[in-house]
Amino acid sequence: MTVVKTRSGDIPKLGLGTWQLSGDHCRDTVVRAIDVGYRHIDTAAMYGNEEAVGEGLKAAAADRDEIFVTTKVWHDRIADGDLQRSAEESLDKLGLESVDLLLIHWPNPAIPLEESIAALCDAKARGLARSIGVSNFSSTLIDQAVDLATEPIVCDQVEYHPYLTQRTVLATCRRHSMALTAYCPIAKGRVLDDPVIGRIAARHNVTPTQVTLAWLLAQDSVVAIPKTGSPERLVENHAAQSIFLTSEELVEIAALGSPQGRMVDFDFSPTWDSE
């Protein structure tokens, strides 16, 4: 298992995203993922599946300390007091004493960042999380969060795939010894029909999804959390860790990206980096 080393411990580079998984299917997918070899499970309060994830963790044939669990606090609950209560509610649903990583899911300009980061640090100090981080933060917001924090900020979870360049955010994360966790890593399936990625996949006798995950995992400081509910895809995605692309292939895939490749954007999103 390869990891990203941060100032507050290691993060496994490949994880299972659980957005849109629910109920028994979510529980069973978590159990299967751990059986396949995943050691990083990602959820969030907003996903509405923390109880199912917790049931999967309990049913899995692995000790708690073997599994890295991430959850996130939704942007309307990141005020002091609200954030800590949200974290406690998540722990109750997950059936855990603490999570390995607690993230602010989105920034909220209506709540001072200083207050949110102080609350996040307090959650760690209380033992609700072993590490803390942010999600959907621009490079400017990362710098501000790190300056405000009294505990290490170890991660920014953002959209990242071959069609969206994240050079500025990635450079900022590296400068602060943080991980960049890539959600939407296969661009909602767009990579499946990409001719460049397809040619590279054929050359290695693997799938376009595996090539894309291998490209992400080859990058320093990058974690990928592909979501799947398919037992076959769980195995396929996990096997991407054993695929090694040439430097030329890595460059070819990176050349597909642009700052305009974003697929996840809301009216409450921050001002993104222009690259």
Image (spheres, grey):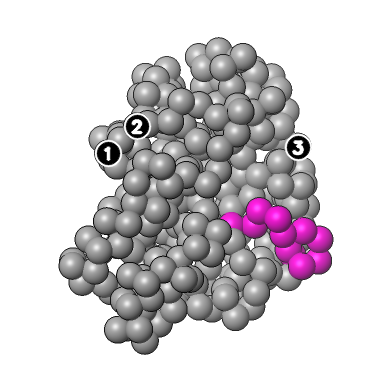
| Residue at the spot of label 2 | 274
- Inter-mark Cα distance, 3 to 1: 34 Å
Disc 3 crowd rating (10 Å Cα; few below 14, some 14-19, many 20+) is some
Give yes or no for residue 240 being in the magenta stretch. Answer: no
Q: Report whether 266 appears left or right of 55.
A: left
The circle on residue 171 is 1
Q: Position of residue 71 (x, y in %)?
A: 61, 44
The residue lying toward the viewer, choosing from 131 and 147, is: 147
| Residue 235 position (above or below residue 120) | below
| Residue 221 position (above or below residue 59) | above
| Residue 86 position (above or below residue 11) | above
Disc 2 crowd rating (10 Å Cα; few below 14, some 14-19, many 20+) is few
Q: Secondary structure at mark 3?
A: helix
Name the quadrant of the C terminus: top left
The residue sitting at 51% across, 37% down in the picture is 135
Q: Amino acid at mark 1?
A: Ala
Q: Report whether 249 appears left or right of 34.
A: left
The residue sitting at 60% across, 27% down in the picture is 268
Which residue range is magenta in the image?
17-27
Q: Quadrant of residue 55?
A: bottom right
- Inter-mark Cα distance, 2 to 3: 36 Å
The residue sitting at 57% across, 48% down in the picture is 70
| Residue at the spot of label 3 | 89
The residue lying toward the viewer, choosing from 221 and 130, is: 221
Q: Quadrant of residue 229?
A: bottom right
The answer to whether any part of residue 199 appears in the image is: yes
Q: Position of residue 259 (x, y in %)?
A: 37, 41
* Among numbered discs 2 and 1, the one appearing first in the sequence: 1
Nearer mark to the viewer, of 3 and 1: 1
